[in-house]
Image (cartoon, grey):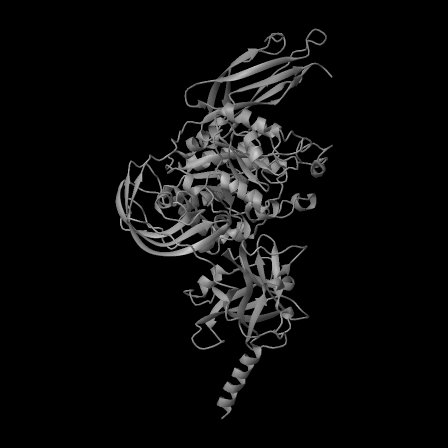
Amino acid sequence: MSRVLTVLLTLLALCVAVPAAQAADSYREKLDDFSAYADSARLSAAYTPNPNGGTNTATLVPSPFGAGLGNAMAFAYTLTGGYSGRSRPVNGYWPGLRAVELWVANATPGQDVLLQLSDGASYEAHLNAVPGFDPASAQPQHLMIPIGSFTPKTGTGTINTAGITSFALYVNQVGDVREGSITLDEIELVFDEKPYVPEVSFPGGTLTADRVGNLVTVLNDAAVLPAGARIVQARYTSDNAAVLPSSGDRFAPKGDFAGNGSTVVRLQQLKLHQNGVTFTVDQDVSLRVRVRNLPPRVDVTAYLKGLTGRGMLSAMHHDQSYADPLNADVLHQRVANQFGVYPALYSADFLTGGTVPYRQNMIGEVQRQWAGGDLVQIMFHVSPPQYTVAQEREGGWGGDQAHETLPGPNRIFSYLYNDQWKELMTEGTPLNRNWKLRMDEYARHLQQLEDAGVTVLLRPFHEMNQHVFWWGGRPGLTGSAGLYRMFHDYLEVEKGLSNIVWVWNIQDLPDDYGWADGDPKFDRYEGLEGGLAEYDANDWSSFSPGEDYYDVLSVDFYDAEGYAARHYEQARSIARRDGKPMIIGETFVLPSQAEQAAQPDWTLAMPWGVRTWNYNTPEAMAAFYHNSIGADGVPRLATRRNVIDPLPRVSVEATSDGREPGTGAVLTFVRPAHSAGEALTVRYVVHDDRDTRAGRDYAPLDGRVTFAAGQTTATETVRVLDRRGHSPGGRTVTVTLLPGRGYRVSAPAAATVRILPEG
């Protein structure tokens, strides 16, 4: 009798918890019922913990909400710092979303439990404020949460249900409670009606791809589509991988053909964009696809260079978690859903901190994107070199104020004092050896891309003319550019990687940046032992690693001046001098059509992640993506195999000018670390200007300089002779490297020093 009574009381509690009856005409889509995960580890990977809150676990348990419901998620938490939470990336194109429906059992009543949806900004629904929820009950409750209950976490705004990128569960601490648990299940999205789904057909059943590189283009040419509609992505199987590999479990935005021939393609689903709305259209149709006259593959750098003045590629940086590998292109999908274009470049990051455990997932997504026909890029927002491979897991962004950077924390915003920098750049020192172990770790991941035939744009030490990053603010070949060259030579020569397109990146900065009188952030270095010297952040060439060391010039645009003509002209001058393509490496605000027309040499523009939606109107984003090249417009790309030259590249730069009566000018010669085991002598020729003469204005130079064994730099001093009162003021001496045995001359191959009058 007691068992029957318990069952009746439980059923009564369930009935009481259910709010008003569901509308008969509503339409529902499953967000998560927790029954598709193989185990708790898969669940935990999909719902990643917020690293700044309390620790927590996500575990699969039998659903307590009714028979036949399979598993539910049990969320057990501690409230360190006042809160704890987990989030999952979603591909949330949900126009017309009316409510979120779910079952919940809060085993720790009284806490502030909330659901969070993000469209770039965060919107929260606090369950304690939802009608029908009893915050004092630990019993199962069935809730219908109106979309209007999701209010901004900060500020004002209205949630954009057509662009949701993440779904999260949080608990905020109330009172002295330190830990607790909550169980969720059967999370559904409620709409007023089932969305319209357009019809697609393929008359004839046989498609011919003649001089066409990918399946999506062929499908668009052959399909009978509603007015204004186009196919953006497809899921399919192919019976001949030599002609077309299958798409797998995820949508393909392109479907590059692998070779000429014939294959049977079985379409499973299509993503169709029509009049600003994306539809997922189920298919069950087999098509015979004949591929002939397949265009050859194109080198990535040659393709970018060929676009100069002719077009701009679309892109998107993935600044979201890699914990769930199935959602590692969530922002690309958001762009595709909203604007009908899958961006042509996928950008990833070796990011320090919480991303480190998921670097393998990142590499896997880069490999998948390349296999699907996209260009791919990897950046390096990484920890300072004194921290070990294991310590990178503890890293983070940090803040860029003096009290935050100067202690040299395990943060991207950090500082290396001059003695630390010298140690980093000196072969065989403890700091140099530790950095090599770090580079080994990056190379280990990049080797997987080489083995898979992936050509990757690699962008280390971005915005190196900024001084708030630990690698930045040091002009010259022994400064930031020297670190770039070290990284390049280590990966290519010592690790043997040949699949890299090297991207050199700087930023548009105000004219007073890097000067104590105009840059308030530079004040921290004044009077600081081991601090930075003032420098011109807008002399971009002073940060160049040299034309032999990079393939693509990249400029980030964040300054309030916007796409200023002077920045474009400087970039174009450098790109033309070095024979390189140029791209907009990062931006919040996308370039308008008028700006693109005025600056036609840019060949790509990449917005920075989810904040793109905060800085651009939907109309501006639509204009950019509709008028730029998407994934299906990119030709088939070739695997790069750089020729690795073991001979050291030698360069020269002017380190300091000379001054009468006897202060010598200094020239610094540099060579890579892999050649430093033996002494090396290089030759040069000296050129005087018309007012300067060796033996009269300076002591003659013998035309050769020797690197000592173990050294990567050598200096030559131009000894100034005293001619006070008998010499003009603007005298110069230029040294130009000459070819020789055992080395190659590399830009900068010439350097000019001045001989200044006394004063």
Quick one: quadrant of the C terminus? top right
- The answer to whether 643 appears left or right of 746 in the picture is left
Residue lying furthest left? 261
From where the camera sits, is residue 680 visible? Answer: yes
Tally of numbered discs? 0
- The answer to whether 697 appears left or right of 6 in the picture is right
Question: Which residue is at 52% across, 45% downward?
Answer: 317
Looking at the image, residue 155 lies above or below residue 317:
below
Looking at the image, residue 18 lies above or below residue 396:
below
- The answer to whether 27 appears left or right of 79 in the picture is left
Residue lying furthest bottom? 1
Image location (x, y in percent) of residue 357 = 49, 53
Q: Nearer the viewer, residue 110 or 426?
A: 110
Quarter-wise, where is residue 259 in the image?
top left
Looking at the image, residue 319 lies above or below residue 665:
below
Q: Nearer the viewer, residue 239 or 510?
A: 239
From where the camera sits, is residue 672 visible? Answer: no
Image location (x, y in percent) of residue 306 = 44, 29
Image location (x, y in percent) of residue 411 = 60, 47
Image location (x, y in percent) of residue 653 = 56, 23
Question: Which residue is at 51% across, 19% downward?
Answer: 705
Looking at the image, residue 571 lies above or below residue 161:
above
